[in-house]
Amino acid sequence: MNVFAFDALNVFLLACLVVTAIAIARLRGLFAVAMLSGIYSLLSASVFVLLDAVDVAFTEAAVGAGMTTVLFLATFGLTRSRENAASHERRLPALLVSVACGAVLLFALSDLPPFGAADTPVQTHPIAERYVETTHDEVGIPNMVTTLLASYRGFDTLGEVMVVFTAGIAVLMLLGRCSRERAEDDH
Amino acid sequence: MMFAAAMVAVAITMSLALARALLGPSVYDRILALNVFGTKTVLFIAVAGFLFGRPEFLDIGLVYALINFIGTVAVLKLMHYGELGWIDGAGEHDDL
């Protein structure tokens, strides 16, 4: 029963993802596209929750559905919110590139272990057992994922935070210049 | 069984909200569809947690509800003012 429900839910969510993706590709009004990309993020977050990757799902929902939608709409305030239809000469190369990318990804997919396989290196490597046994004594944070990210992989996470911080400063510099120029035009 | 029935109902509502977001026609239909879809995601996570024996997912659903609310307020504010309240020189719109 539960396995059937799990499969049925996955099929339902992935079908919704495909429908949303096709609609995003076909629509020309970018406001609707921003809304649909928010829905796309929520759908993928649901898939991640079903796959027990709740931290990834949470990031996807916060960044994809929350932040990115707002950023898209803020951009429409500065530009226009309608997309020009691509010319016919450009469509064929674009189609070829996306089909080639999809083929490469499908090819790579065939090399992955089956879902939930217990004999993959990730599961069998002794380091996992070491973390499970010692994180509580060594660090003392109840959540093991948080312990790994914030303590054992602390420098890695610090680097990620620096990348995000730098990107944020760059965006603020660009936007700040825009609004200063506009303010000077007004006076 | 009860959770399975609830899940089917949530899935149907998700499809209906998705259909509204696809069809439009007005901007507010789509905003409302996004908001409804966010709420359905919260319900989806909550029901899925109980359906698969992981009721602690309920906390995650609560945080999703907060994100959904803030997101909708931000989208509506952008629709109303056309921007998120950048400082536009004069400083006369302090309450933005």
Image: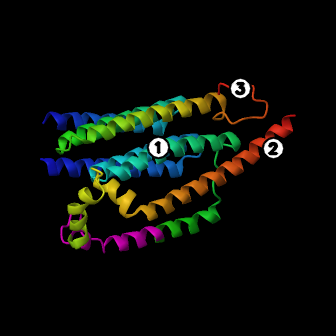
Could you tell me which chain the residue with mark 3 belongs to?
A: B
For this view, does B77 lie left or right of residue A173?
left
Q: Nearer the viewer, residue B35 or A124?
A: A124
Dot 2 crowding, Cα within 10 Å, few <14, some 14–19, many 20+? few
**Residue under circle 1?**
A65
Q: Amino acid at mark 1?
A: Ala
**Nearer the observer, A88 or A113:** A113
**In the image, residue A23 lies at what x, y percent?**
48, 47
Q: Which residues are magenta?
A: A101-123
State which mark lies toward you, 1 or 2: 2
Is A110 within the magenta? yes
Q: Label 1 crowding class (10 Å Cα cut-off): few <14, some 14-19, many 20+?
A: many
Q: Position of residue A179 (x, y in %)?
A: 75, 41
Where residue B14 appears, x then y in whole percent? 35, 37
Give the labeled residue for mark 3.
B93
Nearest to N terminus: mark 1 or mark 2: 1
